[in-house]
């Protein structure tokens, strides 16, 4: 195992080498700019969907689960998974670029699905209070109708697919399964929202890691 100083030195050299590639440099800057545009658009979109009326699904699983608040544990797991994933991806500039591109595509898919499938929050829902996204991503407003499909589950699944270290994939799998279970117990999402999330994550990963890599 490399010492931290040597590892940081190798990481810096890897990024310097990648940054010399004009194609990578342009893609990286454009991808970050596009991600920023999505961040600006998201609060307005969620404000719109929160005002419309949708369907309440008859979810047999949620009927069996008594709602309990696991917000704190859920976000400890989510942000822990994101931080260790970012740490794992920083040594691989191309992997990080593709992951950000896949996340942008995944977000666009989610915007499209939420637009096409208007749903009201599940009965007994306990608000999942995100201390970061609630202020930055949602403009400080309470959002409960961003349902199909689960953003947390799909993002964590995308990270599982994107990281290269086997041990990290295992850790992220455990985190993802736990988070998916907790948001169902809290009645934050319907079962279909959680079950569909890995599929959309896999599609976005396949397009960005397989298709774009051939361009």
Image (cartoon, grey):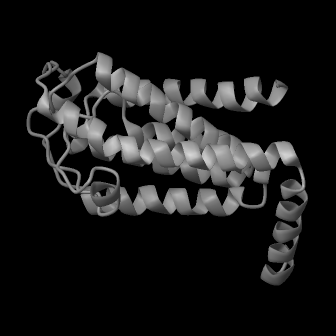
Q: Is residue 108 left or right of residue 111?
A: right
The part of the image, by quadrant, that contains residue 51 is top left
Q: Nearer the viewer, residue 175 or 214?
A: 214
Q: Nearer the viewer, residue 113 or 60?
A: 113
Q: In x, y percent, where is residue 21?
A: 89, 49
Q: Is residue 195 visible?
A: no
Question: In this picture, is 189 found above or below 31?
Answer: above
Question: In this picture, is 168 found above or below 72?
Answer: above
Q: In x, y percent, where is residue 11?
A: 82, 67
Q: Is residue 90 left or right of residue 49?
A: right
Residue at image location 34% in from the left, 58% down from the top: 136
Q: Nearer the viewer, residue 152 or 134?
A: 134
Q: Is residue 43 left or right of residue 66?
A: right
Q: Nearer the viewer, residue 178 or 11?
A: 11
Residue at image location 65% in from the left, 54% down from the top: 168
The N terminus - image quarter: bottom right
Residue at image location 56% in from the left, 50% down from the top: 172
The C terminus - image quarter: top right
Q: In x, y percent, where is residue 59?
A: 19, 22
Q: Is residue 203 visible?
A: yes
Give the number of marks. Answer: 0
Residue at image location 55% in from the left, 63% down from the top: 83
């Amino acid at each position: 195992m490399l010492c931290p100083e040597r590892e940081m030195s190798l990481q810096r050299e890897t990024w310097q080498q990648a940054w010399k590639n004009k194609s990578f440099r342009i893609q990286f800057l454009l991808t970050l700019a596009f991600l920023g545009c999505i961040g600006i658009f998201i609060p307005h979109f969620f404000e719109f969907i929160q005002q419309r009326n949708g369907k309440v699904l008859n979810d047999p699983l949620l009927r069996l689960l008594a709602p309990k608040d696991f917000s704190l544990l859920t976000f400890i797991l989510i942000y822990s998974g994101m931080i260790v994933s970012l740490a794992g991806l920083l040594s691989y500039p191309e992997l990080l670029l593709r992951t950000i591109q896949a996340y942008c595509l995944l977000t666009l898919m989610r915007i499209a699905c939420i637009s096409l499938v208007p749903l009201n929050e599940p009965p007994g829902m306990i608000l999942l209070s995100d201390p970061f996204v609630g202020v930055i991503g949602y403009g400080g407003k309470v959002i409960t109708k961003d349902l199909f499909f689960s953003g947390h589950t799909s993002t964590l699944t995308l990270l599982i697919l994107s990281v290269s270290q086997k041990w990290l994939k295992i850790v992220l799998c455990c985190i993802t399964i736990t988070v998916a279970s907790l948001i169902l117990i809290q009645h934050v999402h319907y079962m279909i929202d959680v079950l569909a999330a890995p599929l959309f994550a896999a599609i976005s990963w396949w397009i960005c890691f397989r298709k774009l890599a051939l361009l």
